[in-house]
Amino acid sequence: MPSKIIKTTTAAAAVLALVLLASQPATAADNTADGQAFTFGVIGDIPYGEAEIAKFPARIQDINADSALRFVTHVGDIKNGSSICSDEYFENIRTQFDTFEHPLVFTPGDNEWVDCHRTNNGAYNPLERLDKLRDVFFDESGKTLGATMPVKTQADLGLPENVRFAQNRVAFSVLNIQGSNNSLQPWTGLGETTATPEQLAEVEHRTDAVLAQIRDTFADAERRDDRAVVLMTQADMFDPSLLAAATANPDTMSGFREIVQAIIDETNSFDAPVYLINGDSHVFAENQPLAEGSPWLDIYGHPAADDLQRITVDGSANATNYVRFTVAGNSADGADVLAWEKVHFGQ
């Protein structure tokens, strides 16, 4: 059955400004486009469980059939949270990723490293699993998976998964930000009740790199006079299912606080809309999580960032579609730059 477009939402709410930061400017040049409209696709939290693993090759072929896509991003979680984080599974997903006919940008999710300490995940050291993911999926720094598209990376900082690029005056920045409070929750499967020193060191290093990439992304977007910035992450830092707990104890979201503050600061100083695309919470959503009056401002702090638009892609059992984003031609500006819609998989 051919892919079927489900008319869900077309967003002309703000402007898309995407910037991807790189700490090594010589790695790859910014990808400049020809001024024409283009589309890109986003998936996340897929495949989950044996049935979806079996369907994943067909899902990829549905995306491949959308020949107009300039690139595809997978925002993390290539497995569910209760399955083994094995080398064999990683290699199998890499083999599937290699069948993408579009450039594929992938950022790891918590299910494939942060949560691998769980007994039913194999009781791995999460940092060892992160190293393995980098070996398997980021073996050619500065290149995408699938078809080759040059990207700037933070490989010199040990984070080849953090990449950025620009297309037709839109800056894209893909960042390793994780669920489980950005990997601060204890590794209980390994018998830990508090975060270990090595865990804290990794979080600090990765967070510092993320903050640098966010700032550099916006600086380059300003320099190029970009029309929008698009940030992509696995973590849903505004997960509605966590709001009550976070309201009662804001420290449950402490791992995101510096990152959210940087996004607020940069969004408010950037004279165009900013988009945050994430997975993690599995339910499609579109909102302005840091607009005036949002309860998240009490958790993360003020001021508001009214120009930040968030889109959460469907995942897990809801991962029956990809989200196709359309970036208007270079003559469009403001709210006319970005639109999106769900495209249902054929089966």
Image (cartoon, rainbow, N blue to C red):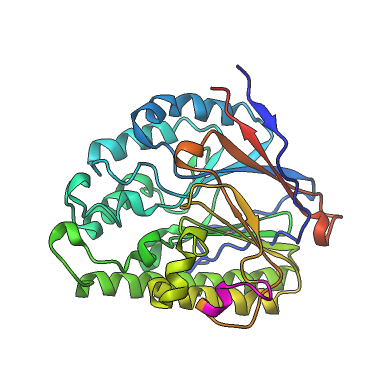
Residues rendered magenta in the picture: 291-298
Q: Residue furthest left?
A: 191
The spot of residue 179 in percent (x, y) is: 40, 60
Taking the image as shown, residue 98 lies to the left or right of residue 202, namely right
45 in relation to 303, above or below:
above
Q: Nearer the viewer, residue 208 or 59?
A: 59
Identity of the residue drawn at 38% across and 66% down = 182
Q: Relative to 184, is 41 above or below?
A: above
Please, is residue 3 above or below residue 156 in the view?
Answer: above
The N terminus appears in which quarter of the rendering?
Answer: top right
Residue 83 can be seen in this image: yes
- Give residue 276's quadrant in the image: bottom right
How far from the left and from the top, in percent, is residue 72?
57, 42
Up/down of 342 relative to 218, above or below: above
Relative to the observer, which residue lies in front, 233 or 315? 315
Q: Is residue 291 left or right of residue 53?
A: right
**Residue 343 belongs to magenta span:** no
The residue under the point 44% across, 25% down is: 55
User: Looking at the picture, how far across and down is residue 5, in whole percent?
Assistant: 69, 31
What secondary structure prevails in the magenta region? loop
